[in-house]
Amino acid sequence: MIELKLPASDADIRKLKAGDEVAITGTLITARDAAHKYLIDTDGAEVRDILNGGMVYHCGPVVKKDASGKYSFVAAGPTTSIRTEPFEPPVIEKYHLRGVIGKGGMGAGTLAACNKFGCVYLSALGGLATTLARSVVEVPAVYKLEEFGVPEALWVIKVKGFPAVVTMDSHMKSIHDDIETASKKNFERLMAK
Amino acid sequence: MGNETLKDAFLELIRRAATDLRPDVMDAMRKAAAAEGKGTPAASVLEQKIENVRQAAEGSTPVCQDTGALVFYIDYGPDHRQKDIEEAAKAATIGATEKYYLRPNAVDSITGKNTRNNVGLDAPHFSFNQRDEKGLRVRLLLKGGGSENCGAQYKLPDGKLKAGRDLEGARKCVIDAVYAAQGKGCPPGIVGVCVGGARDTGYACAKEQFLRALDDRNPDPKLAEFETRLTGELNELGVGPAGLGGKTTVLGVKIGALHRMPACYFVSVAYCCWAYRKAFMTVSAEGEVTHHDRA
């Protein structure tokens, strides 16, 4: 298990290889479809500093608000990443992202952006909602909550030892592509029966 | 029974569905972990998921943050009114959202606004069935959006798949849908299939297959055999838990059939993630509420 602290440098990220298990400590921002569009359409002033050398997490959490107005994460597994594929390369470039965390993998555009700008895609385990929420130690801020709603807002979260696996590295290797290629052979064999 | 009591019964039903999985699902997950082999990455993925369910059940927090869409299947007797049941279920849905058993998931498709309480147009979804017997029988599915996106419908014959209008053709459709889903629908998946019907009824029938227990046997011997064969074949794909490779791509395949029109041959495929959330209850004529592990 590799300890990875955020913000990360280009060198930190280039060291990572597909298949590496990491434990992330630092600040993440949750972002889904609506948030990605917002990051492209605006200059994202509120979150720009955190995203610089940081990571976005494709996650639509369940969030509790206590009597004093303080937020905490109740459930926080990853959502399917491929939906943000058209948005991710420009967001990686514009905000100097070092990582994108989600599930299911992403496409050729994101893989090329990871290679060009020193970024990785990390898989968190889908549905690991309660376990991953326990890695979220603080929720310092939230943006666009009113407009986007709880699942799609930009939640700023401090995580400690957040577990993920690098499945697309900055050297053009994607485990998702490898699995798809391998399963395609099985698929063709089954379809020929 | 009063509507407040019925609301409480629905609230407990939702809590059970969102924060724990039924024993048939957990048995299948444990068997899959054993089949993957000790120390393999695929077994580790499954073990982490099993541990997540334990933690979720312990703290009554959602097994998955995408608590999905609520689908209620309700059989009711002459001592109940459909409208009252619907009101109690909706009030319980709002209550469950306030208690963080559910994520607010109902979004207005036109304005993009989230209603914040999981109630909206056709949210929750109800499938009512009136019967002569008194009391209620309620079956609830929580269907996550990521896996819902992996559903597919085919119109046979399909030249590209070389699929004809028979069960062999249907087999190719199911293999194609599960291959296309890869790791996006949170495998190991549970696959609900309907052979026949129309566009809408086919999809509904495919989703209804999720009410069945993973270890049940299809009453139609031909379909029972087909389910076993497809489960084995889909697990040869190698997509594996979380789509990261392995022997377990699906936990089970459940197949239903509907009569079709001569011009139509639809095969509808519904995909459910490993977080296969369902809960069942009955309310007797005397108002006694019982929660069940199986439908």
Image (cartoon, rainbow, N blue to C red):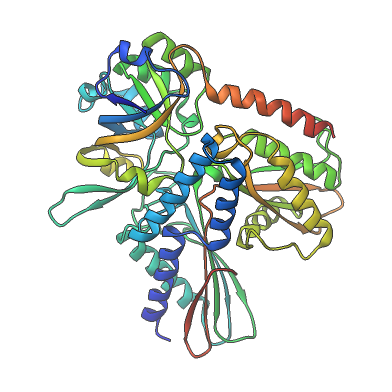
- From the viewer's perspective, tell me whether residue B268 is left or right of residue B151: right
Q: Which residue lies furthest to the bottom in this view?
A: B286
| x and y, in percent, of residue A176 in the image | 55, 26
Q: Which residue lies furthest to the front in this view?
A: B38
Residue at 60 percent of width and 51 percent of height: B31
| x and y, in percent, of residue B205 in the image | 68, 58
Quarter of the figure with the N terminus of chain B: bottom left
| x and y, in percent, of residue A125 in the image | 45, 38
Quarter of the figure with the C terminus of chain B: bottom right
Q: Which residue lies furthest to the left in this view?
A: A68
In front of the other: A9 or A80: A9
Q: Check the image and report above or below for B181 versus B31.
A: above
- From the viewer's perspective, tell me whether residue B77 is left or right of residue A136: right
Residue at 83 percent of width and 61 percent of height: B221
Decide if residue B184 is in sight here.
Answer: no
Residue at 32 percent of width and 57 percent of height: B100
Q: Residue furthest top?
A: A116
Q: Check the image and report above or below for B134 versus B42.
A: below
| x and y, in percent, of residue A148 in the image | 33, 41
In front of the other: B10 or B155: B10
